[in-house]
Image (tube, coloured by chain):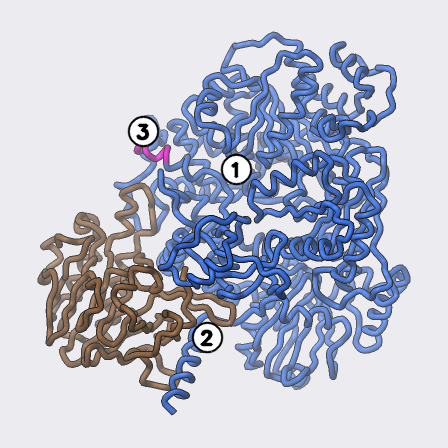
Chain colours: A blue, B brown
Amino acid sequence: MSGVSQKARSRPKGPPVRAAKPANAPAVLPDQFKQWFARRGWRPRDHQLALVEKSQARRSTLLIAPTGAGKTLAGFLPSLIALAGAPRRNSMGAGLRTLYISPLKALAEDISRNLVAPVSEMGLKVSIETRTGDTSVARRARQRVKPPQILLTTPEQVALMLSSADAGYLFGDLDTIILDELHALAPSKRGDLLSLGLARLATLAPGHIKIGLSATVAHPSELLSYLVPQTAPDLMRSMADLVVAKGGADPDIEILEIDEPVPWGGHSALYAMADIYRAIQSHRTTLVFVNTRMQAELVFQELWRLNEANLPIALHHGSLDKARRTKVEAAMSEGKLRAVVATSTLDLGIDWGDVDLVVNVGAPKGASRLAQRIGRANHRLDEPSAALLVPANRFEVLECRAALEAAKAGEQDTVIARSGALDVLAQHVLGMACHGPFQPDALFEEVRSAAPYAGLTRARFDRVVDFVATGGYALKTYERFAKLRPTDDGRLRLSHPSLIRQYRMNAGTIVEAPMIKVRLVGRRRATASGKSGAARPLMGGRVLGEVEEYFIEQLSPGMTFVFAGEILRFEGISETEAYVTRAPGADAMIPSYAGGKFPLSTHLAKRVRAMLADSEQWAGLPLPVAEWLGLQNERSQLPGVNDVLIETFPRGSRHFMVAYPFEGRLAHQTLGMLLTRRLERDGARPLGFVANDYGLAVWGLGDLSQRIADGSLDLDQLFAEDMLGDDLEAWLAESSLMRRTFRNVAVIAGLIERRHPGLEKSGRQVTMSTDLVYNVLRRHDPGHILLEAAREDAATGLLDIARLGQFLARIRGRIRHQVLDRVSPLAVPILIEIGVEPVARLAREDLLREAAQELIAEATRKSG
Amino acid sequence: MRNTAPLLELKPERLDVGEFSQQPVSISGRAFVADVSGALYWPAEDVLIVADLHLEKGSAFASRGILLPPYDTAATLERLAATLDAYQASTVICLGDSFHDRNAADRMTAEDRGTLSILQEDRDWLWLNGNHDPVIDARFGGEVRSEITVSDITFRHEPTASPVTHEIAGHLHPAARVSFHGHVIRRPCFVGNGNRLVLPAFGTYAGGLNVLDEAFAPLFGNDGLSVFVLGQEGLYPIAPRLLKED
C-alpha cells in the first residue's frame, strides 16, 4: 500500500521519508497505532485521521488525494482500528468485516503484501486474504464459508459471490467497503457492474459504510453519489462526505526543447531519443510513458540502439506475456532497472519503487492522466515530482503546453457522468436470479439506488428482465425456454439450476478482443514449412506475448514487425498461434495497434484552441512552432476558440477539405465517415479521409472550392447536426465498429456465451456468430433492447457520437471557410497521417468488387 | 500450393464488373449458374440446389438456454422464396442439414411451416439427409433420399473425401477470408475445381469454414481450388493468392 509514503519493500535502504516527530496524533488513534507511527518515525496525516473520524461517525466518505499521499493506509486505518479494538463478533454472518475492491487483481495482491507489515508490526490479530480469478477453487470455496476479516478482491469476484445462495450469510457482518482507484473504476462498465453489486450489499448489510479512494478529479460529485445509495433518485442526489488531502509540492514539469526541429507529423518522437537517453542516464530510475503499444515497441528499440552504456532498460505493455511483465515488475521494484518503457498498463497504482523521473512521450491527451503519470515519480508527497514531456509533432507541442498549464493550475478533466449500461444490468439480473427468486419491484428499487442507474425507467428495467427471461424479442416464441419463471407469490425464479453455471462462466464485463499468441520459432524450421496450415512441425520456441487477431490478419508471411522489443518476421499461423522468427537488422513494418489510444480530452482541446487563437501566447512556444503558426496566419487563418476552420485546396489530382474541430480522433473518424457519405451523395466524389486528434482531411475528385463557390455545396448543410440521424443510422448498418460494439454487448448481456462449460470458445467463433445474430436482429427486430444498448455504447465509446454532437451544435453558424491554392501549414501534420493511419475506405462491397477486378485483369492478361 | 493454384473452370467468363449477381459455373462439363444468394441453378434440368439450411437452429440454441433471435428460419425461408421467385425452378434439391436437429418440426412456428409448404407447391421437392437431419419429419413434405444422381451428376450432403468428379455437395459451409489492401473480409463462398462443387451454407445462422482449412484438402488434391465469394450485391471470383487462413 502506498502508506505514509513509505515502501519498506521497495526502498530497503531508504531513509524514513518524513522527519521523525514525537507522536502527537490526536485521540482518534488508539495507543497501539500511535506507537506504531512513532516507531516508524511517521506522523499520521490529517486526511488519514479525518477518515478515521468519518468512519467512527459511520459516514461514507470519498478521499481525494494525489499519488503518494498515503491513500491506501488512510482507507484501511479505520478498519484496522475497529478490528484491533473489537473482539471478533459472530452475530449475523461469516465474520467478513472489510471488503476491499480494486480494479486490478495485481493491485489487490500488492496491497495484501503491504498490509501485512503494519498488521504484524502492531501485533494485530487480523486475517487478510485476497480473492481473484487466480485464487484456487478450494480456497475460494473455503472463503465462502469461512472468510477472512479483510478480503481484497475485484468487481467480478464481488458479482460472483453475490450470485451465490449464501451471499446473505457471507456479507452479513460487513462493516466497511473500500473502493480503490475509484476514478478509474467508476466511469466504466466494470463500474456499472460494481455499482449494482454495491446496491445489493447495501440490502444485505445495511449498516456498512464505504470509503472511496480516488486520484484528483475536477468535479467529484459523480464519485460522491456513486458511494451512497440513491434513496430518492427522482428528487435528489445523495452524496458521500468528501475529504481532500492537501496537495504536495507542485510537480516540476518541463517540455523537452532541443535544437532538432519538432517533426511535422508522426507519433514516435524519434528525433528526441538521444535526449531521452541522456535524461535516463542522469536519473536513478526513469519511467518512460507512451500512449500506444506501437510507440512502446519503437521507443524501446531506439533507446537500445543508443544504449552504449548497456543500462538496464525494460519494456512493459499489455500484450507481453504475463511472465515477462511480472519479471519486469519485480526487477523494477527491486531497483534493478534504470528505465521502463510502458503504456497505460502502469497508469494504475501498483507500487513502482524509486522512480525519480517520468518521461511522457507523445501528447498526454488529458490533464488528469498526465497528473497520474507524473505521480509515479517520487511516491512522496512533499518532494516535487520530476517530469519531462516530449511532444512527437507540432500539434503535440501545443497539447503538451496546454497540459503543462493545466497541471500548474491544478486543473483536472471531469469524470464523465454515465448512465448505467443495459447489458451489465442484464447480467446482474441473471446473477440475482442465481442468488434466489427475486421480486421485480424490489429489485427495480435496489437497482435505482445505484447512482449510474438512478435514471433508469421502469419500462426499460422490465425490458431488460424480459430479455433475461425470454430474449426480449418482438416475436414471442421462447416462452417455453424461459430462463426466469414466475412463482406463485409474484417473484421470478431461475427455471433451471444449470443456468447458474452459465452465469458463472459468462460473468464480468471485460470482453477481450480476440488475441493470438506470438511464438518465436527457429528460422529453418519455420521457413521449411512455409505458411501451409497442414504442415505443423513448428514446436518449441517461446511465446513472446499476444497481439490482437486483426493485426495478424493483415500480415502475410515474410512481413516484419516490432514486438516484444525485437524485429520479427511473420512466418505463418496455426490455429491460435502466430509463428515468427527473429529478423535483426531488417526494416520493420510497424504494427498499427489501436490498443491504448486515448482521444484528446475536451478540457485540453479547449486550451489548445485558445492558445492557437491568441498569438500573444505563441511567444512561449519553441521557435519553429511559433513560426509555423505565424505562417498559417499569413497563408490562411487560425481556428478560433468557438468556431471551426475549414480549408479547401487542390493537391496533385485531388481536392482536399481539411477541418480543425479539435475533438479527438474518435469523434473525427465518425465525422469523416459521415462527411464522406454526404459528399458522395452530393456528387463530390470523395475517395477517402484521415483523422487525428486535432482535425481531419477528406479528399476526392470533385473541386470542393468550386462547388462551395457556386453554391452546389453548402458547408452549413454539410456540417448540420442532422447527419447524426439517417446518415449515422445508414453508416452504422455496415460499420465494423458497430459490430464489435454489439459483440461486446451481446457477450456481457449473456446472449452469446463467452465460454462453453469445459470448452473454451475461441474469440474467432464468437465474432462469427455475433455478426450473424447482429444482421438478423437489425433486420427483424430493430427495436431490440440489445441494439439499443449497442447504440448507446457506440455513442460514448468508439464512435464518440456524444462529443461529435456537442461539436456540431457548438459550430452551428460558425463555420469559417478558407479557399487556398495549396496545402496550408496547419494541414501538413494531418495530411502526413495519410500513409501512417489506415485510410478509411468506403463500403466493403467495393473492396470485393476491386479484388474481383484484379482477378479479371489477370485472367484477361493471361488469355490475351 | 494454394497460393499458386491456377484458375480452373470456375474462372469468370464475363469480364465486366457491373453485373455479378450470377456467375456461370461448369461442373464436369455441365453448365450451372451460381447465385449471389448461395443457391445453384441447373438450367438444363430446371433444378435449384441449396445446402445446409439449418432451419430452427436459433430455437435449438434457445432450448439450451441461449436465447438467440428467433428469426432465422423465417429469414432463411424468405431468401429461399426470393431465389425461387427469380428462377421458378420446377425442382428443388436441399443438400442435407436442412433442419438443425430432429425436433425442429416441433419448434417451427405455424407461420414458417406455412411458408415452407407454399414454397413446395407445384414443384418437386427433394430433401437429402445430412448429419444433422438423418431423419426428416413427414410433416415437412417432399421426398427424402440420402443422395441422388441426375444426368451423371451426383448430389449428396457430405463431399467425398477424395478428388472425385461429377459431385455437388454441401456440409462444409465454405467461407473465404479475403485480404485486400490491408482489409480483411470473411464471407461464405462457392468452392470448386471444375469437376465438383461445394455450396455455401444457405442457412441464416450457419456460419462458415475457411476453404483453406484441412477439411477441404482431400477434395481438391493438387489441382487447386477456385472460389466465388458472396457479397451483398454480387458474387465475386477471388484470386487464390488473396485468400487467407483464419
Looking at this view, is B89 or A708 the one in front? B89
Q: Which mark is residue A487?
A: 3
How many marks are shown on the rendered structure?
3
User: What range is drawn magenta here?
Assistant: A495-501
Position in image of residue A18 (x %, y %)? 84, 26
Residue A74 appears at what percent x and percent y? 72, 25
- State the separation of the CA atoms marked 3 and 1: 27 Å
x 38%, y 84%: residue: A859
- Of callouts 3 and 1, the N-terminal one: 1
Looking at marks 2 and 1 on the same chain, the residue that comes earlier in the sequence is marked by 1
The amino acid beneath tag 2 is Asp
Q: CB atoms at circles 3 and 1 under 8 Å apart?
A: no
Amino acid under label 1?
Answer: Leu
CA gap, disc 2 and disc 1: 41 Å
Q: Nearer the viewer, residue A583 or A222?
A: A583
Left or right: residue A781 versus residue A194 is left
Residue bearing the label numbered 2: A846
- SS assignment at label 2: helix
